[in-house]
Amino acid sequence: MQLQRIALAWMLKRENEEHSPLGGLLADDQGLGKTISMLALILKNRAPVVRKGFSKGSRTAGTLVVCPVSVLRQWAQEIRDKATGMADLRVLIYHGKNRTNDQNELAMYDVVLTTYTVVGKEVPIPSSNKNSSDSGPIAFMDWFRVVLDEAQTIRNRNTRTAQAACNLHAKHKWCLTGTPIQNSITDLFSYFKFLQYSPWDTYPRFCSDVKSPVNQRPDKGCQKLQAILRPILLRRTKGESSCLSCWVELVFLKNKLMISLDFTDPNGDIFALVQEPLLMDNPLWIYHQEL
């Protein structure tokens, strides 16, 4: 439970920052309890009871969890198992052809569970010809918090799903993934875009500050990338022997068959540098002690 307590303290700190983004990227290894950590955050920092719309035509609701359909029921089961009756956590599975189209009904729930497929269908994107009247109710909600589970699903910035997810409105936004980078450094842009992590949530700025430096001068570029990620990224691995050692780590390949390859510069340097863990400036053990 220490890993989850540390994650909770870090996430509470992120949500109470004075400057955006009021969220971040929780990238712990699979099996280290990202779902439990997020559930603890939902219970600890609940949406205001009095819910008034932030803007005309919108409704304010609790937490929207977006996940693959394969883990939708798992989320619901985790909430039933881990949240006691005293928590009075109202949960709705928003999926299937009979789902509600009433914004007021969605606003009644503390947690709404849905899928990337539903988000892609219901949330309009700038390049779409879809009328707002054809959009689903989740597109018009001002959520207190939006959580993307298995956030690597949006890694391709050009997909409709990624663009729709980035158009969800929320005060707090979180990405949960055990594999923050699967294909290339460009995968990070979708997270920055979703989190509204300015100024790197625009692709030209991301390319000039992150992509190009990493490709052209890996040593300096990766140092800059680590500095950019430090405030918003928490990652712990199964190999850590103590909660006192909380490292931020970015890995291109993990748990793969290792094959000897002849890298040509700068590819070999990039791979080596990105594997190097980064010790956070403020050890999270301090947060753990404060709980």
Image: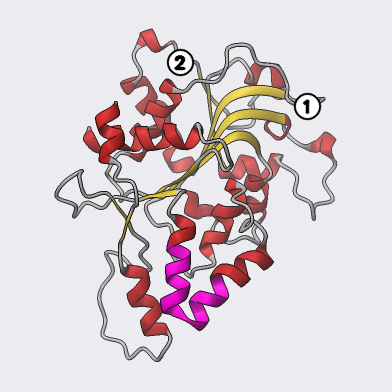
Q: Residue furthest top?
A: 86
| 17 vs 163, nearest the viewer | 17
Label 2 sits on residue:
89
In the image, taking residue 4 as reference, residue 142 lies left or right, namely right
| 128 vs 29, nearest the viewer | 29
Front of the two marks 1 and 2: 1
Whether residue 181 is visible to the viewer of this picture, yes or no, is: no
Question: Where residue 6 appears, x then y in whole percent?
Answer: 30, 36
Look at the numbered disc 1 and give the secondary structure of its residue: loop
Q: Are marks 1 and 2 in contact (CB under 8 Å)?
A: no
Label 1 sits on residue:
55
Q: Quadrant of residue 13?
A: top left
Q: At 68% across and 29% down in the image, what residue appears?
A: 142
Q: Amino acid at mark 1?
A: Ser
Q: Which residues are magenta?
A: 211-226
Real-space Cα distance between discs 1 and 2?
26 Å
Question: Where residue 49 appears, x then y in whole percent?
Answer: 58, 12
Q: Amino acid at mark 2?
A: Leu
Kindly report the secondary structure that dominates the magenta region of the rendered protein.
Answer: helix
